[in-house]
Amino acid sequence: MKELLEKVVINYPYLAAGILFAIGVLTVLTRSNVFKKLIGINIMESSVFLLFVSAGNIKGGNVPILDTANPKPVYVNPLPSALMLTGIVVSVSVTAFALALIIRLYNSYGTTDLRRIGEMDYEVKKK
Amino acid sequence: MTAGLKTNLPVFIVVIPMFVAFMLPTFARRIKWIEGTVAAVKLLGLAAAAWLAHMVLYEKDFPVKYIMGGWPAPWGIELVIGNLAALFILTIAIVSLPVALFARDNLEKEVGPKQRIARFYVLYLLLIGALAGMAITNDLFNVFVLVEVVTLSCCGLVSSRKGHGAAKAAFNYLILATLGSALVLGGIGFIYILTGHLNMEFASAELGRVWQSSPHTVWMALSFLFVGFGVKAALFPLHVWLPDAHSMAPSPASALLSGLAIKGYIISFMKILYVIFGHTLMQEYGIYRILILIGMVAIIIGSLSALLQKRLKRRLAFSTVAQVGYLFLGLGLANKEGLMGTLLYLVSHAVIKSLLFLAAGAVISATGKENIRDLAGVGRKMPIAMGTFTIASLSLIGLPLLSGFIGKWHLVLGSLGAGDILSVAVIIIGSILCAAYLLPIIRIAYFEPAPEADWQDPGLPQKAALILLAAGVVLLGVLPGPFIELAGRAAAELLLIQ
């Protein structure tokens, strides 16, 4: 038990990523407001970015710029951060696209609540 | 010149559609030019895919590794051009050309004015390029980026339909698909944390060394990837977005989504499972059993839900859920016949389902009726649309001499090889259920009195598209030689890389 706790404390970024991921997924699945869903998606993606970036971090590591005159003993792994730059770009474009869709939804239904949109569709179908 | 073209061919197959996609809105002002450019790109793509398949089949030095930008692996991105890639690229080319042909007259009705049509073609080309990329890439992060490109262009294609139903379907699809991509990215992250590699083969070798020291992380990676790709490929309990998205999209887009996009995810998942994790790990973690079980449930529940649907396109969409079950079932059989079955069924379902969706789209736009019950007598008034629909239906049910039969036959052989009688039974029950939900459509269309209405077959390009795809369905069933050869070699390759 003590060992497990120690592991958790040392790897606290992973724990934070896990908690954020759970919050994000719950928000996406339980909220019916489209904006809240979108925020949930963003929280979830950020947690994955945190996971990657903290995996690249090394305690006491230096900025990964090679200086041949006085080389540093330890460098931080730059690859995960570079990857997450792409990930952030993807996430931004998803958000932008979702916002555009929300505008279209609001123009045609007059609400941003998916449950009410569903009810309206159902009533149309009944008629 | 030819040598350079030959070496760089796989890159061109991916890059040219993407490049043209981004250039299209800037240089093509008239819809005719846009359509001409897209047709030219697709014809080039078909020629290139055929050439690639021919080279892979008959030349000895394949699979070839292509090193992007001159940086060798594990630092740079590697493309692997082998049997699997050639098979899937050929499928993409075969399906996407008729779809482009069909889209010509259809889009004005379903999508709207010409700026919107131009955007539709942009998304179409992006989707094609990214799918081809998924087939050849050997880099995990590349897989994620291409998955995202495919997802976003699919959502765009769904939302391009006029009317507000499409926006809602696209939003739901976008939310669930993004959840899936976050899970995929997380899974890739765990693999990277464990192995320090993004190249699939290096990651696989490293994973074989380290998995015993952190078995739980491997579990996390596997389950994240499984659920992520499951959401995207509409595996049974995670398929909730599919019926809305596929039935709301414009018909050419439905054909692409159901026929190709889902298959791209399955190909990627297959590569991740078999190339990175490999046989030993998958057996250790009991993935095979889960795959078979979920596949069987998906076949039964998907077929039963399809039976309950009253609207034509929704019934076809639920049928896709059932067919995805077959593909996952084949992945879980873990023998050569089973994997071959998955690959062959993947190819034939791509052709069949796009034909079904296109024919349904032609019928719906001619009659204006979406309910199956209202389509009485449409078969006599629209002989080509309903005739090709019938061929595709019979093929999906699995009649011999049509393409669906070959995939199902290999799946049955694979299940027998794995000693799994239950899945043989489920495959056969699935076929019967498939007949139960497709044949009534044909019965209503041909054997019920037609109302007085002016329903006509679509114009020449659309007829040509339907006939081309129907010819594809029949040819794949009568002369499946090269496809069986490619699928067999790809399956052997996947099972040997461990």
Image (cartoon, coloured by chain):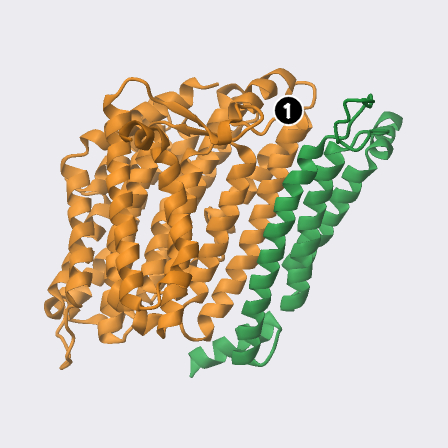
Chain colours: A green, B orange
From the top left corner, tell me how far across and down residue B94 is, in percent. 25, 45
Front position in the image: B377 or B217: B217
Figure check: B115 above or below A77:
below
Residue B212 image offset from top left, x and y in percent: 65, 18
Residue B322 spot, x, y in % from top left:
37, 48
Q: Quadrant of residue A115?
A: bottom right
**At 77% across and 38% down in the image, what residue appears?**
A14
Quadrant assignment, res B453: bottom left
Q: Is residue B287 left or right of residue B378?
A: right
Name the foreground residue: A36 vs B82: B82
Chain under callout 1: B
Residue indicated by mark 1: B195
Residue ID at (66%, 67%): A35
Give the crowd class for mark 1: few <14, some 14-19, many >=20 residues within 10 Å. some
How many tags in the picture?
Answer: 1
What is the three-letter code of the residue carrying label 1? Thr
